[in-house]
Image (spheres, rainbow, N blue to C red):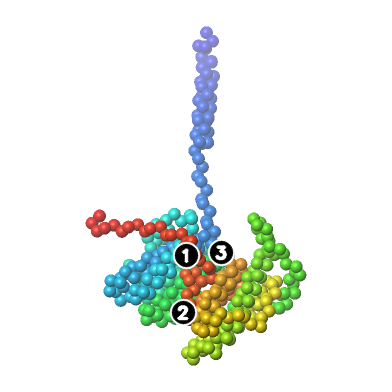
Amino acid sequence: MKEDDPENRPKLRYFRYAVISFTVLIVLSLGFSLIPADPPAPADPPFSEQARVAALQDSLDLRAAAGRLSASAAAGGDANPAAAAETVTLLTLQARALLSPADSSPEKDAPGSATPLPSGHSGPPAAAAMTVEPTLAGLASALSASGVQRLSDAAKSDGGMARLLAGAGTAQLLAAENLATAAGVAEDTLPHAGAAVSPAAGALASDSTASACPSILPAPAAAGQEPSAAGMSAVLGSALSAAVATEQQSLYAYQAALPRLGAGDAPAAEAFLGQHRELAAQAAAHSRAACSAPPAQPPGFVLDPDFLAAPRDGLARLEVAALPAYGDVIAQADGGLRSWAIAALQSGARRAAHWNGGAGPVPGLLLDQDQLPELPASPAPASAGT
């Protein structure tokens, strides 16, 4: 029979090999297609988000250190309990302001643990070097270092986040100086970010820049539309014009307050009047560079009777009320102009502090504390022997 023909056996064997090889190929191809590919690595978050996360972690770490210091002082330690408690309050409000809905548990990491840092962020979080039993001087140094970092990150962050970080950093620097005073430590030993505002701060524009501005400024963008570059320039010009008007009012108020202040307050008021005169000129130059005509100096302002009766308190309220104007410029500007606005914000917060005015946890940003999210509760410490 043909089936038993020896000549057909090699052909049948080759056919079987072919069928088996084809079957194996099909199985392998199906297996490879069912194995999912490795997911792509997640993209790095934007710099502003990295800066916010780093600021939040620093505030939580420093808050924990200040809480331990406050508890130690209340138990009879050497630290000033009031200064430590005020720092806890400040850092609590700042942490709440820095919270994002994505932060399901901002205190999940132990203080000083590893935290994603923005590119260009130098070194570990500010509180990482804090000891288990912090000192008032150590807390002042760590808080000042955090403030310097916040201001550095503010210069490179997006508008709204830049204003938040600039305000938080400014408040931390002032709080660090208060802690240093309470600890008997010289303020010049703390890390500083250069708070003084000089006439050369920022990139001042010459009057000739205004001649290149269009004669008709663009209308504001409609709701739901992204503003154009020209529209953003108009918003910046408006913010700078508001800063000019704020400085004009401050000049008038200081001139009216000087004859009514005591001899001990007059030298500081004279110096602050000079700062406002410089800031008014700088803000007007920046306003013209942004194609916005600065407002003319009005002949006078209506001052509240309480201001004239208690000019020291009135100047404190005046300086605090002026801070949001520079917060608006920080949010709209970038580069040298933003650096100038950050320095002006610090200068204003220091003047407010001199007159015992409370600039708040984030100077330059109006916060409704009742609307801030609450921090998740910290895990309860384990009891001894458990």
Mark 1, mark 3: which one is toward the viewer?
A: 1
Compared with 279, 112 (above or below) is: above
Q: Amino acid at mark 3?
A: Gly
Residue under the image location 51 percent in, 22 percent down: 16
Residue reaching furthest left?
385
Compared with 255, 219 (above or below) is: above
Q: Amino acid at mark 1?
A: Gln
Residues under labels 3 and 2: Cα distance?
A: 28 Å
Task: Report the residue marked by disc 1.
Answer: 369
| Residue 13 picture location, percent across and down | 51, 20
Residues under labels 1 and 3: Cα distance?
A: 18 Å
Task: Report the residue marked by disc 3.
Answer: 160
- Secondary structure at badge 2 equals loop
Residues under labels 1 and 2: Cα distance?
A: 21 Å
Q: Quadrant of residue 248?
A: bottom right
| Residue 263 picture location, percent across and down | 49, 91
| Residue 150 picture location, percent across and down | 49, 68
- Secondary structure at badge 1 equals helix
| Residue 214 picture location, percent across and down | 75, 69
Q: Is residue 105 left or right of residue 201?
A: left
Residue 329 visible within the image: yes
State which tag comes first along the sequence, 3 or 2: 3
Q: Amino acid at mark 2?
A: Asn
